[in-house]
Structure formats: C-alpha cells, structure tokens
Amino acid sequence: MFGKPSRTGRTLQYVALTGYLIFLGFPLVWLLSTAFKPPRELVQLHPTLIPSNPTVQNFVQAFTEQQLGRAALNSLQVSLASAVLTVLVALPASYALARFRTKLGTVALGWVLLSQLFPFVLLIIPIFLILRQVGLANTHAGLVLIYVVWALPFALWMLQGFVRNIPRELEEAASVDGASRLQVLRRVVFPLLAPGIVATALFSFISAWNEFFFALVLVKTPELATLPVALARFVGIEGTARLGPLAAGSLLATLPSLIFFAVMQRRLSSGSLAGAVKG
C-alpha cells in the first residue's frame, strides 16, 4: 500500500535524526567540556567548547569536598534495590491484571494511574510521618520503599502491555503438554517478558538514581546522602554554583545510567517471540 520512501525522504529522515542526536548529545558534550575547564575559563566572557588548559582539579575537588564516592555508592545500592523490588512486585501483579480481567482489576489499574497525579509536596509530610512511625525515617530502606511504591504504577502499566502481547495460545499449548501454571509462567511467559522486565528495571533504576526531592527530605545523615543531594551542595545559599566541581560530579553521575543502559539495551530488541510458536 505504501511504497518505499524516496531518496529525498530518506535524506530528510537522516537530517532529522542527526539534528535530534545533536540536540540530545550537546548538553553532555558541554558538560564534559566544563568539567575539564580551570576556574578562569569558566568565567570568561566568550566561552569555548574545547578547554585551552584542561585540568582534572574539578574531579579532585568533587571527590574530596563532598564525598561523592560514598554518595555514589549509596545511590547505587538504593537504585539497584529499588529496581529489583519493583520488578519482583510488578511482574506477578501485571500478569494478573493482563490475564484476569475483572472490574476490580480495571478499577485498581485506574487508581494506580490516578495516584501518579498527586504532587510530591502534598505527599511528603504524610510519608515522612509514616516512615518515622515505623522507624524507617533517615534510612536507605525507607527510601527504597518510597521509590518502589512511586515506580510501581508505571511499571505495572508497562509490563501488563508486554503480557498482553504474548499470545495465549503459547500458554495453552504448554498446558496441553502437561505443564503446570507455575511451569507455564517460568518456562514460557517470563522468558518472553525479558524485554519488558529489562525496560521496567531500567526505568526503576534511572528514576531512583536521579531522584532528589525524597532523598533530600527523608535522609538527613550526611553519610547516607545520595548522589543528587551531594551534588546540590555545590550550590551555595546565595544560589552561586561552583561550576567546575559541579560539572565534574554531574558527569560522573551520568555514567552509571549510561553503562547500565548500554549493557542491557540488547534485551530491549524487538522480535522476542521469534521461534516461540511451535511448528
């Protein structure tokens, strides 16, 4: 019905894609440039992209003054725990929502999505009081709990879409062959859900890694601070930012997300059902 795109159309597509990549990549390139600039170059009237006198002093200051190493380890622990728990909770719940359609399930899914509309400011005081009541205030465990609850609505919505894309015939065929419900889930459904599981884990990890507001309010001990909170300390009370150390710390803060995505991005490829249907 639709013919192949013309050479002009392909050229326009490549131009648009190149412009979009530049739009996404330029802030990271500028951040890299700023991280290696000495203080004098940071305040010059006409900034340059390539530092004339590159220095690693910004990275030294970032680590020695604000203990970014400890903060990065705290963020890594909290983010990994949040991602794992979110997947473990969302996986069976999303399967139930997708396969067993009831009015209660529809209402529950609608309420889950509606809960995302509540602003952080309205929730932070009740959350803090509840965590303090159960002894989880100012702890990483309490922070992980909040991150899991906050990521679950989107994780459920995303995973149940992946479940619905798996043909029921595959499960019925496995049942006919004598597989139990648990075996069907473990050997048929869960392997085919690998792209959805990876996407959910990526979303949960990056969401927890970048989160600032809850970490700032709920965690008060400096040794427990996460990386976004530690980076905020490079901005003074007057609002004056120390651009060099801040850029160096921010650059290091982006690396785990990029590495995590690069390692797992192959699992996000399409065609996960290829070869699943019996011949």
Image (spheres, rainbow, N blue to C red):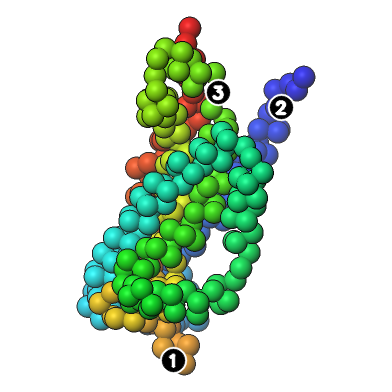
- Mark 3 vs mark 2, foreground winner is 3
Whole-percent x and y of residue 253?
36, 64
| Residue 255 picture quarter | bottom left
Whole-percent x and y of residue 244?
36, 76
Instruction: Give me the residue at 54% from left, 18% from top.
Output: 169
Cα distance in 3D space between marks 2 and 1: 57 Å
- Mark 1 vs mark 3, foreground winner is 3
Identify which residue, 158 or 56, lies in the foreground: 158
Image height of 252 relative to 234, above or below: above
Q: Residue furthest bottom?
A: 238
Residue underneath mark 2 = 6
Cα distance in 3D space between marks 3 and 2: 40 Å
Classify mark 1: helix, strand or loop: loop
Left or right of residue 239: residue 246:
left
Q: Amino acid at mark 3?
A: Arg
Residue underneath mark 1 = 237
Which of the two discs, 3 and 2, labels the residue nearer the N terminus? 2
Badge 2 density bin: few <14, some 14–19, many ≥20, Cα 10 Å: few
Tell me the tag on residue 168. Answer: 3
Instruction: Give me the residue at 33% from left, 56% from top.
Output: 81
Whole-percent x and y of residue 233?
37, 82
Q: Pointers 3 and 2 in contact (CB under 8 A)?
A: no
- Residue 62 makes an appearance in the image: no
Image height of 205 relative to 75, above or below: above
Q: Amino acid at mark 1?
A: Ile
Left or right of residue 190: residue 7:
right
Classify mark 3: helix, strand or loop: helix
Identify which residue, 14 or 259, lies in the foreground: 259
Q: Amino acid at mark 2?
A: Ser
Which of the two discs, 1 and 3, labels the residue nearer the N terminus? 3
Badge 3 density bin: few <14, some 14–19, many ≥20, Cα 10 Å: few
Instruction: Give me the residue at 61% from left, 49% from top.
Output: 109
